[in-house]
Image (spheres, rainbow, N blue to C red):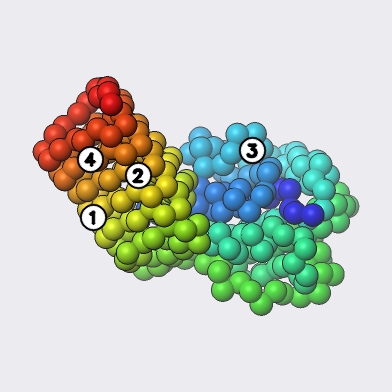
Amino acid sequence: MSVTGAVVFLPREGNGVSRMLEELLFDPAARWLAESLRAAGVERFFVVCHSDDREKAAPCFPEGTEFVTGVSQDAVEQLVRFLGELSGKAVVITRPVLLSWQAARVLADDSVAGPMDNRDTGVYRMDAAQLAALLGQGAGLEEALKENADKAGGRSPWYQDVSLIRGGGEGRAEAELTARNYGAARLLEQGVRIMDPNTCYVGPQIQVGAGTVLLPGTILRGETTIGRDCEIGPNTMIRDCAIGAGVTVNASQLNESTVADGARVGPFAYIRPGCQVGPQVKVGDFVELKNSTVGE
């Protein structure tokens, strides 16, 4: 049985900022974490954050996520109720981390034998009912996690795919590189060709069909979806677009628009929000579109 829920803490640092809400490659770190867990099959989320961070944190997690502030008098009661509604194991994350998509799948898969906890990075997998019982008896969360993890038998050795997000400029740069690598690795695993993963930047919500080629300098942002057998790049930025199959986009920028199957865009085209480019259309060099519909 797979894990059905996750408890995620978004702690603030001494400067009053949560590292999980800082952007990594145009998306908050919390969204990278949530998307990796959702792809692994985690269905429900319980998020503990500062009351001032809730508005920024909400878009990072799926609809229906429960939020609570750590200082709420009934915070423990809400967490116990959430855990009691889960079946099997729960993922608990107490520190700012990034999970690769592969690591998230292993973490969320109950069929993988052995304990899943790492106190160094604050990532745990444990029995939801057991954790709820400990909390219900008045144990603090850290105490309950430690006791539950110890009963599981110790740490799992596979956590090389968990990256702790550290403070400071150097830590942020390291986290950005990790996010870039995770984004590229996820698409490569799905049959996408990336000519140079070091120069492609792929957000956590991006979906790309098998057989598509990403050339150097490609930036995919937001909720962009790209079909099969496309060629994207070089030096192309696509944000919040729906791109069909067999599309070529060369050295161009596309924003909040739809491009149908077989279309060709660029080089040096600029598609602004609100456009619909039809099948087999060619948007040539130095063309700019805005709020336009171009038929087949």
- Front one among 21 and 243: 243
Residue corresponding to mark 3: 65
Q: Residue at x 66, y 37 (%)?
A: 66
Q: Which amino acid, mark 4?
A: Val
Query: Which one is in front in this view, the residue at disc 2 or the one at disc 1?
Result: 2
Residue 147 placement, left or right of 181: right
How far is the residue under mark 2 from the one under mark 1? 16 Å
Q: Which amino acid, mark 2?
A: Gly
Cβ–Cβ below 8 Å for labels 3 and 4? no
Q: Which amino acid, mark 1?
A: Pro
Residue corresponding to mark 4: 265
Q: Residue at x 45, y 49 (%)?
A: 209
Residue 55 placement, left or right of 130: left
Sequence-wise, the earlier of marks 1 and 4 is: 1
What secondary structure is marked by label 2? loop
Q: Residue at x 28, y 26 (%)?
A: 296
Residue corresponding to mark 2: 246
Q: Position of residue 21 (x, y in %)?
A: 47, 48
Residue corresponding to mark 1: 234
Sequence-wise, the earlier of marks 3 and 2 is: 3
Q: Position of residue 246 (x, y in %)?
A: 35, 44
What secondary structure is marked by label 3? loop
Q: Position of residue 256 (x, y in %)?
A: 33, 32
Q: Which amino acid, mark 3?
A: Thr
How far is the residue under mark 3 from the one under mark 4? 39 Å
